[in-house]
Image: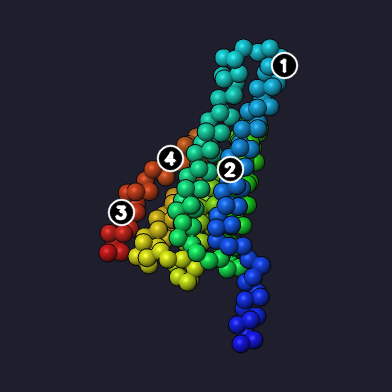
Amino acid sequence: MEEAARTRDDTQPLPSAERLKAFTDAVVAIAMTLLILPLMESVSDAGTGKAPVAEWFVEEWPALVAFALSFVLIANFWLVHHRLFAKVERVDTPLLWLTVLWMFTIVWMPVATAITTAFAEDTIQLVVYIGTLTVTSAVLSLTRLYLARHPGLHDEPPGAMRDEIVGGWIVTGLFVVALIVSIVVPVVSYAALLLLALRPVVQKVVLRIRA
């Protein structure tokens, strides 16, 4: 009896699953909005100097590409996280902190994106940007793994969860490969992220081997 009461007291301060999902959505929305701030400052500076609009687009195209890429990547991470948590019904402490860690990586993305255009490209810049994406993906994979080992927190079928775990680690692995390629072959740079397009092929091969 006392142990049950203590358990209830320990879990009582934790947010509900729905509240955690709503908070996560808000954090992602703010992070995606922050991506545009460097471009807004650039527009203001160009307007003050009376520079032609065409000139601004020519000068800022790397920042525009970085903004679009990060926006799409964060949106994709959010969609994956949304699908993962769609059937989560309860939250415990480890799951809460895994989610907080994932949100931390998402909030850091606008900074990593700004670094790609504010400084000359070097190895550290690649590590910061692609490394952030790798950590974000890895935390999602760890979250899937934790949920798979704690079925009482969700109502996802075991088979479906296993497939998602495989797919998640494949994406994380491709981010790691992209990071290595971008460092070893500097001329490739951020184009190494195109390796993520191999995910369906790699996942099909892995699942076939497992079967």
Disc 1 target residue = 48
- Residue type highlighted by circle 3: Lys
In the figure, is residue 163 to the left or right of 148?
left
Regarding residue 132, the answer to whether it shows in the image is no
Q: Residue at x 45, y 53 (%)?
A: 83
Q: Amino acid at mark 1?
A: Thr
Image coords of residue 51 (percent x, y) = 65, 13
- Which of the pair 122/107 is nearer the observer? 107
Q: Residues within 10 Å of mark 4 (few under 14, many from 20)?
A: few
Asked which secondary structure carries label 1, the reply is helix
- Mark 2, residues whose alpha carbon is within 10 Å: few (<14), some, or many (≥20)? some
Reply above or below: 165 against 56: below
Which of 201 and 139 lies nearest the eye of the viewer? 139
Q: Position of residue 59 (x, y in %)?
A: 60, 21
Frontmost of labels 2 and 1 is 2
10 Å crowding of disc 3: few (<14), some (14-19), many (20+)? few
What separation in Å lies between label 1 and label 3 (alpha carbons)? Answer: 53 Å
Please give the residue where the numbered disc 4 appears in the rendered image: 194
Residue pointed to by mark 3: 204
